[in-house]
Amino acid sequence: MQDFSFPAPPTAPDTAELRAEVRDFLATELADYPAAKRIRSWSGFDADFSRKLGQRGWIGMTWPKEYGGHERSAIERYVVLEELLAAGAPVAAHWIADRQSGPLLLKVGTEEQKRSILPRIAAGEYFFCIGMSEPDSGSDLAAVRTRAVPVEGGWQVNGTKLWTTYAHHAHAMILYCRTGSADDRHGGTSQFLVDLTLPGITIRPIADLSGARHFNEVVFEDVILPHSALIGPEGNGWAQVMSELAYERSGPERFLSTFVLLVELVRAISGQSSSDREVEALGRLGGHLVVLRRLSRSVAGMLQNGSNPALQAAVVKDLGAIVEQEIPEIVQQLLATEPDLRSSDSLSAVLGYAILNAPAFSLRGGTREILRGIIARGLGLR
Ligand SMILES: Cc1cc2nc3c(=O)[nH]c(=O)nc-3n(C[C@H](O)[C@H](O)[C@H](O)COP(=O)(O)OP(=O)(O)OC[C@H]3O[C@@H](n4cnc5c(N)ncnc54)[C@H](O)[C@@H]3O)c2cc1C
């Protein structure tokens, strides 16, 4: 059995001032941003907004100053993240780069990669997408078939990536692909830093259940990458991807995706005498969120200490997705509101969005079954 503890989150300097500063900023910036858009949560895309956050020093917060960061603690970063999410701020443009692409480069990137890319991410001007999933390789990432072969001057890439969130707006992708034998499922893979403007890359948006086009199919046809695009040692892709997943699965976005709907629910039932059922439902959800926050902050501390809390991150994501998906269900049980994405009624539109998007919460970033397999293995049950 692996270490399955959640140590106390690290202590941080008093964060009340920072929290107040973020709230003030959001109150001004999002004054006219309606709940129907806030419910998009970390899927809401606004490049200008990300740039403003960069100017405030709220991207790349924990990174060294020499790479454009601000050398603040993981808990200070956490305060900013949860305030942004609670307000439903449109953070998608920089989210992936700040959460995992930047930290990956910081950990295993070359000096040139760090110097050329990290300051631009921290400024909120350079956006990333994740090139892991493929048509026949989602849960089973080790089965990727996109391949990079060494050629004169670099690498030639052929293959197709799928479900690539905001590839059509991103400047770069962290590509996970095969560089060695298909028999060497883990050792034969590597990661590359890909400039998405290179010739041979075609990005085709895919509509989701609600008709929104945020993810894509990305096709590579004889794309030439320079030698300098390799991230970390050749053949180390699997280990790098696994450590990236701890960043991807443990943040507050894994339990706050429908928080804006919860706020709307509280608004709808406050001001009247609440029933026992309503009070009990709110108490239960509040209790779950408090526990999830504690677990997630603990993982933030472990990441800051340089450990790889993949197991604990899987717990946060699995439990978080349950709560995020439960919120629209509970709203439907308590209120007689008709869900309608296009309604001018705020609650109806927010509920409509949440219902159509909630199924994806237990797919994106690793499915429920896969996470539970990881947890079972960690507990020594398989
Ligand atoms: C909104 C959204 C955004 C996404 N963004 C990105 C992105 O930016 N970049 C990216 O690379 N990917 C992205 N993905 C893809 C996501 O990571 C995959 O959808 C996910 O990993 C599942 O892979 P799959 O769709 O191929 O399903 P499959 O792996 O084919 O799984 C199908 C079903 O079988 C189950 N299953 C599979 N293997 C096992 C097993 N061993 N044991 C038990 N059950 C199993 C799964 O749990 C699932 O229910 C996104 C997905 C969504 C929904």
Image (spheres, helix red, strand yellow):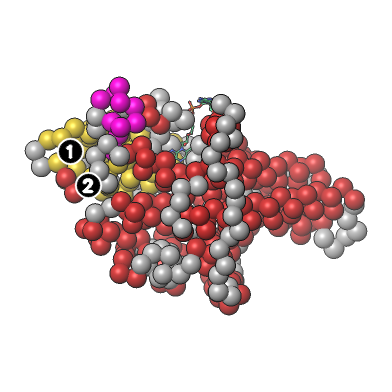
Label drawn at residue 262: none
Q: Quadrant of the C terminus?
A: top right
- SS of the residue under disc 2: helix
Q: Nearer the viewer, residue 151 or 309?
A: 309
Tell which circle, 1 or 2, labels the residue nearer the N-terminal end: 1
- Could you tell me which residue is drawn at 43 percent across and 66 percent down? 61
Residue 369 image offset from top left, x and y in percent: 57, 30
Is 183 covered by the magenta stretch? yes
Q: Is residue 368 visible?
A: no
- Could you tell me which residue is drawn at 40 percent across and 34 percent down? 133
Q: Is residue 350 visible?
A: yes
Tell me the residue that label 2 is attached to.
Answer: 229
Classify mark 2: residues with Cα within 10 Å, few (<14), some (14-19) or many (20+).
many
- Could you tell me which residue is drawn at 64 percent across and 56 percent down? 294
Q: CA distance from mark 1 to mark 2?
A: 9 Å
Q: Nearer the viewer, residue 344 or 184?
A: 184
Q: Is residue 287 left or right of residue 231?
A: right
Label drawn at residue 155: 1
Q: Is mark 2 within 8 Å of ligand 1?
A: no
Residue 62 image offset from top left, x and y in percent: 43, 65
Q: Nearer the viewer, residue 372 or 379?
A: 379
Task: Indicate the amino acid at tag 2.
Answer: Ala
The boundaries of the magenta stretch are 181-190
Residue 27 image offset from top left, x and y in percent: 59, 71
Q: Main secondary structure of the magenta part?
A: loop
Residue, far top: 183
Number of marks in picture: 2
Is 134 covered by the magenta stretch? no
Q: Is mark 1 within 8 Å of ligand 1?
A: no
Q: Quadrant of the N terminus?
A: top right
